[in-house]
Image (cartoon, rainbow, N blue to C red):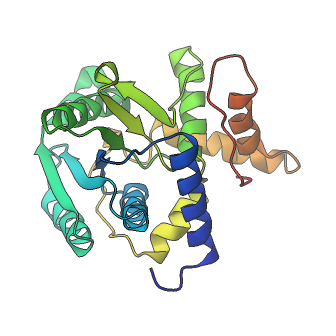
Amino acid sequence: MKNPSTQYKKLRRVTQKAISGYKMINPGDRVIVGLSGGPDSFTLLHMLNEYKKYIFNEFEISALNVDLGFKGNTENLKKIFVFCKERDITFHTVKTDIKKLALAPDAKKNPCFICSLNRRKEIYNFAFKNSFSKIAYGHHQDDIIETLLINILFGRKIDTMYPVQEVFSGDIKIIRPFSLAPEHLVKSVAKEINTPQTKKLCPVDGDTRRDKIKNIIKELQKSEPFANIKRNIFRALSNNSLNFPEFRSDFDT
Ligand code: SF4
């Protein structure tokens, strides 16, 4: 990347800090990046690819998109394909009909839960069958905070996404290299590297529990200008007895 902005350098720094601090990637790893078609996953793929070159290609990287079965996805897939091709990254896609399960009448209460669960299963199975050792997701600090609140408010448990998680009895690890990066930083770099604009095809997009939690945090922040609400929730993850890994970022969110 020629002449990267300060924001770009910041994201690169916190990404590398998370990768090394949480020991996310080892030499010889085969990493598959879950590419949803949103700016966060494109940015992660770009950053990981840069990191791979920086450490002399000590690991492999490929991308995987799970086609949920929404009409009109071909255009999106073309854009994803071009983005990967420009970076010489192998791109895989798995065709599914997850949309039918997510939008079925009995899933009305929580379509995103059904959708994510099934999408995750497809990714795990693909990674397992094709001998990938790591699955990388573009989830950032705000996703971790929002998931914690979603779990508390709707799932009656204190839990969230972790920087590193094991699946298949530890044969495969999930990694989240943006765990220490706030959303605004990821979005700003997504603009800078010009990630493709893919079409939103899901009818519930924009009206999810995550969207509601986002708005609640925003409103709370407005009414409490002297408290850094997101940072405080994030820090609370480290300051408890729940056996959480150290969760600190250099950035106020
Ligand atoms: S918004 Fe639609 S595509 Fe996204 S997780 Fe929810 S159901 Fe799936």
Tell me where residue 104 appears, x and y as whole percent.
Answer: 22, 27
Splitting the image into 4 quarters, where does residue 248 fall? top right
Q: Residue drawn at (59%, 52%), measured in percent from left and top?
A: 17
Q: Is residue 94 above or below residue 1?
A: above
Tell me where residue 147 appears, x and y as whole percent.
Answer: 53, 33
Report if residue 179 is visible in the image: no
Left/right placement of residue 221 relative to residue 149 reads right
Q: Is residue 215 above or below residue 171?
A: below
Q: Residue drawn at (63%, 19%), measured in percent from left and top?
A: 243
As rendered, which of 95 and 45 lies closer to the eye? Answer: 45
Tell me where residue 113 appears, x and y as whole percent.
Answer: 36, 28
Q: Is residue 7 above or below residue 202?
A: below
Q: Residue drawn at (19%, 43%), measured in percent from left and top?
A: 68
Splitting the image into 4 quarters, where does residue 153 fall? top right
Tell me where residue 10 appears, x and y as whole percent.
Answer: 62, 65
Q: Residue drawn at (32%, 41%), measured in percent from left and top?
A: 135
Left/right placement of residue 193 relative to residue 129 reads right
Ligand 1 is located in which of the four quadrants? top left
As rendered, which of 51 and 145 lies closer to the eye? Answer: 51
Identity of the residue furthest to the top in this view:
156
